[in-house]
Every structure is written in structure tokens, then in C-alpha cells.
Amino acid sequence: MLLRTILIGAASAMLISAAQAQAPTVKIGLIQPLTGSVADDGTADVNGEKLAVEERNTRGGVLGRQIELAIEDGQCKPAISVNAAEKLIQRDKVVALSGAFCSSATLAVMPVAENNKLPLITGVSSNPQLTEKGNHWFFRADENDALLAKAFAKILTQQMHLKKVAYVAVNDDFGRGAVDQFEKAMTELGATTAMKEYFEHGTTDFYTLLAKLKASGADGVFMATETQDGSIFVKQKAEFGLDLKVFGVGSWATDDFITLAGSASEGIYAAVPYAYTMTTPENKAFVETYKARYKGSPGEYSVAGYNVINILVDAIARAGSTEGEKIREALTKTDFVGPNGRFEFDGKGQAYGFSVVLVQITKGIPMVAASATIEP
Amino acid sequence: MDLLLQLLANGLVNGTFYALSALGLTLVFGLMRVVNFAHGEMYVIGGLLGWALTGVVGLDFFTSLAVVVFGMGVAGWLIDRVLVSRVRDQDEEVGLLLMIGLSIFLANSALLVFGTTPRRVLSPFPTKPFFLGPVVVTQSRLFVVALCAALIVAAHLLIQKTALGQAMRATFQDAMAARLAGIRTEGIYGFTFGLGTALAGAAGTLLGSIYVAEPTNGGLISLKAFVVVILGGLGSFAGAITGGLILGVTEALWGGFVSTNSVDAIGFALVIVMLLVRPYGLFSKRGERP
């Protein structure tokens, strides 16, 4: 009799756990570049999203169900990202989309989300145009280039007291765009332009530019470049004996940059959306769990992925449903505190309230020198 | 005035670097008449090897340089034996395609082996600024300029004063006559291509200690080297030096007083003018080539 009770108990326990396991998961679709030239960054984003899902699931998931990620490689290409979105929506029946990293790919996925009435949220794409499209299904949980310029221009003029600024950038859309935005923001705050010069990708000798920079009498130089050009520039600047504050956007303050520039990287400022050395309690906890899980410090893309999932899951919980329209509605009322600050969305789906930081490279480590809040 | 002096100094230093990076090409393109589009890739591989030897293996700079020169020389000789010799007597287009293919192959192999990260060759010379009046240079730059001058003189002496050099000149003036006179022309071709490759590799290592070496940068190096060779005249060392200096100084002055973003156009403008005015370059004698 006793045996029978135990057996029944065991069997029913098994049945219950089987039923729990069979409760459909809440699926979130991810479109990130997992191959190609930005694969590293895309993987970092996915790592952040996975970490958030694991944390949420150990706390019981959402709506009493577990969360599952359906991951597709969008390669940062518009056409492939659209296919990935269609597959995630039709076959995997995801309730929301996260992606698609590069602004051009995200732009292509936006109408797909709209047609299928699914929310799409990005933590990376920074082209200011995306949130100007009037697509109510799209949310951006990161800064855009214009907001970044506005936030940093304040730090540079008011805290670093720059008055005469030189602008040096790589001659492409990114470099010219960044200089335009920063020059506009800095001029509004009273700084004058001492010099504005562009150079081609792969330029190896900056002595001419440096001679000009010296003659221009600037008290700081703003740069928009990637790792190799930037590292050569700061090295040659040190050789040149030019004592100027350098502020960079692009791939500055990365490990590669610091290795290449060596001691010349000392004291360089970089404007970045996130630094693992940020001192909020949320960030300390995040960095600790991230390091335990992945054995490396999180970068801006890891934290982006982490935030996106948390914002989405919060919205699903508030909506009390996995219906697209209800999640969208709940997303507009987002108020999430992540490692890098508080996130709310304005009427266009642009996040605000979170922090961006100015780091200074000190003994090879990007230390936070100042931070600014992204304002709506 | 200070700016002008500084720009002139930059231009002269850069010009020497351009001459150095064009030395190998002036042999292979100028003497052998092989349009070596892979020249920039050979330079880049020299720089990456220099990085691997100084930064990873831990050899000192000069030993690494010697290893790179020898290794690249052997590689160049092999390329000539295995690939270039097969198209030697065919139309120029065939050789052209071969070299384009080789450049793509080398660039992508370098990407596969070394990755996309730019690398720096470790050099023993300090990069601290060094003032000559108002003009800034660094010891490492002056050192490379000196070494570059030594290489140019050595290559010049080799070709003008030795029996081997005489055989080279004879082969490229008239291969048939050279063979009749008992010169093993195939060996001469292989040696010249090897020497050109070794010089490209040496330039890559030397300049890799000042700038960086990265697999995708070969195209730009090739373009500048072609500009220098065309300005100076095919196969002339004096021409390579003059061409390099003209290019360096013009770029520096244009960048300094006009705009740095159009600097890369200057070299090609110079080439157009040169081809209109003196199509054989500054130092090439018309009758020297058949």
C-alpha cells in the first residue's frame, strides 16, 4: 500500500514536471551578425542576451513560462536579416524581435516587424534616422549618433574646458557624420573650430596633419577613426611631442587599440556608450556575473544585448500576454534600470535617461572620467 | 616658416620611405618588365614576418631583418621559378593577370594566417621626439632613412659594379644575346625576382617598425610604388630616390597648405604630368631598352 502511494506520488510528480516542461516557452527572436566582419561584436551581443535569459529563467521566466531565444545569423546584411526575420516570425512563432545590429539591416527588418505586428528592439543600431521613420513597432535601447554628440559636447566644453577644437576624421560616412554632429554640438556650446581635416583609411603617416595641428593652436583634438588609424595617429602625436588632449569616437579604448598604441595611449579620452569600469551597483553585479559566465569583461555590445532582453521581458510581464500589440503598448511604458543607467522610451521609440561615459586610458585600462545622461 | 620647414622635413623623410618601398618594384617592373601588382602584398608580408619574428619569436630587430630578407628572397625566387617563368615569353596580359591573381592570393593568405589586426615590428630605436631647431623628427625615423640610403647604395653597386649585375643588365637588354654569351638567363631572372621580393620584404619590416603592417594595406603600397617608379624612370635607382622624394615633398606641402583628404590624388596627378612631358621618367634613357 505504502509502495503504491509512493509510486503514484512519484508518477504524478513526474507527470507534473513533464507538464511544466511542456508548457510552451516564450520565444524571442534574435537577428545578429554571427559571421562576417562584425561577427565578434554580434557574438558579444548574443552573449549578453543569453545571460539575461538565464537570469530571468532562474527567477521563474515570464508569465509562468520559460524564455527561449531563437537565434538567426543576419550577417549585418539587409536581405539576409529580412529572411531571418520572416523565418523567426513564421516558423519559430517568436513574440518579439531583437536586432539586427547594423543600422542598414535594422532598417530593412523594421517594415517586416510592422507588417507582422511584432515589436522590434535594437540595442546597437545608432543611425539617427531609424527612429524618425514613424514606425511604432520599433524601439531603440541605445544612444544615436546625434544624442551622443550632444551629451559629450557638454562634457568636453564644460568639464574639460575646450575652447579651440581641431577635428580630424577618417574620410567616410562615419567620420564625416561624427565630425558634423560634434562640431555642431560643440559650436552651440561656444567652442570654436581651429581646424577640420579628413584622411583616407589606411593612411600611415600623420606628420603633415600633426604639423598643421601644432600650427592651428587647438587646445584639444576630436577624432573619429577606427583602431589602426587612431593608434598610429596617437603614437605619432607622442613622437611629435605634441601635448594636446585627444578625444576619440570609434574603436578607441579597445584592447587592440591599447596594444598597438602602447604607452602613447596613456591619457587618451574616448567617448563610449559603455565601459565595464562604470561604478553603478547594477554594473558591478553585471560585470561579475558576466565574467563568471564568459571569462572576459563585457563590452558595449554585451550590455546592449543584456538590456534589450530585460526590457522586452519586463514588457511581456507588464502586458500579461504575448500578443504583439500588448507588448508594444507595454514597451512604451518601459522604466528599466540596467548596468548603464535607466531606460525610458520617448514617443518615437528612442530611449533616454541612461548614461554614456568618457573614459580615459590609464595604465592600459579605460577608466571612467566623466559621464553624461542621454536626454530626450 | 616653422610649418614650412616641418613639412619639408616630413616630405623628405616620407620620400625616402617611398623610395625604399619602391626599390623592389623598380627591379621587377623596371628591369624585368613584370608588372608586379603583388609588390604591396610582398611588402606587407615582410612587415608581418618582421612582427612575428620580433614580437612572437622574440628575435632582435637586425636578426629578424636578415631572416626576412633571406626568406623573402627565397620565396621570390620560387615564385619566379614556379609561376613567372611559365608566362615569360607570352603576351604581357598573361603576366598581368598572373600578378593580379598572386596579389589577391597573398593578401588573403596573409589575412587567414595573421588576421585583420594591424601589427607593429618592435624596433630598438627610441621614438622620442628629437628637435632640429623648430623641426621634429625621431631617432627611429632617421635610422630608417640611413638604412634605406645604405640599401639603395648597396643595390646600385650590386647592379653597376659586379659581374652578377653585369649579367643582369645584359639579360634584360637582350636575353638572346646574353644566352649566346654564356649567361644562364633563367638563373638571372630568378635572382632578380628574388632580390626584388627581398627588398620589398625589407621595406615592409623597416617601415613596419615606424607604422604598422596589416594584410589589407598592400594595394595602397603598390599604387605609391608604381607612382615612384614611373616618376623616376623604369629600372633606375637614382630615379626611385628622386621619384620618392618628389612624391613625399609634394604630398607634404599639399597636405599642409591645401588639404589632407586629397593627398592621395597628388601622386597620380604627378604621373599624368610626367607621362605627358617625359614619358620615360626622369632618369630612364630612351635607348637603353629594346
Image (spheres, coloured by chain):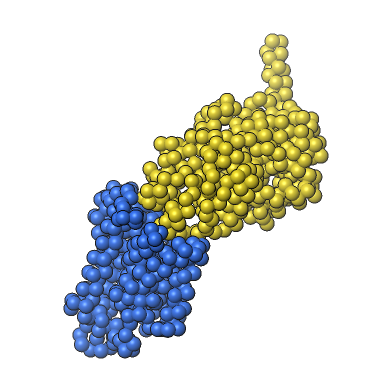
Residue drawn at the location 43% of the way across and 81% of the way down: B275
Q: Is residue A28 something one can see in this rendering?
A: no
Image quarter in which the N terminus of chain A is found: top right
Image quarter in which the C terminus of chain A is found: top right
Q: Position of residue A279 (x, y in %)?
A: 54, 28
Q: Which chain is blue?
A: B
Q: Position of residue B192 (x, y in %)?
A: 28, 74
Of residues A241 and B44, the one nearer the viewer is A241
Q: Is residue B176 something one can see in this rendering?
A: yes
Residue with the most extreme front position: B1
Residue drawn at the location 47% of the way across and 74% of the way down: B269
Q: Quadrant of residue B184?
A: bottom left
Of residues B215 and A180, the one nearer the viewer is A180
Residue drawn at the location 55% of the way across and 51% of the way down: A193
Colour of chain A as rendered: yellow
In the image, is A162 to the left or to the right of A238?
A: right
Quick check: A173 above or below B273? Answer: above
Quick check: B136 above or below B229? Answer: above
Of residues B157 and B57, the one nearer the viewer is B157
Residue drawn at the location 25% of the way across and 59% of the way down: B66
Residue with the most extreme top position: A2
Q: Quadrant of residue A43?
A: top right
In the image, is B209 to the left or to the right of A221?
A: left
In the image, is B173 to the left or to the right of A35?
A: left
Q: Position of residue A307 (x, y in %)?
A: 64, 35
Q: Position of residue B19 (x, y in %)?
A: 34, 68
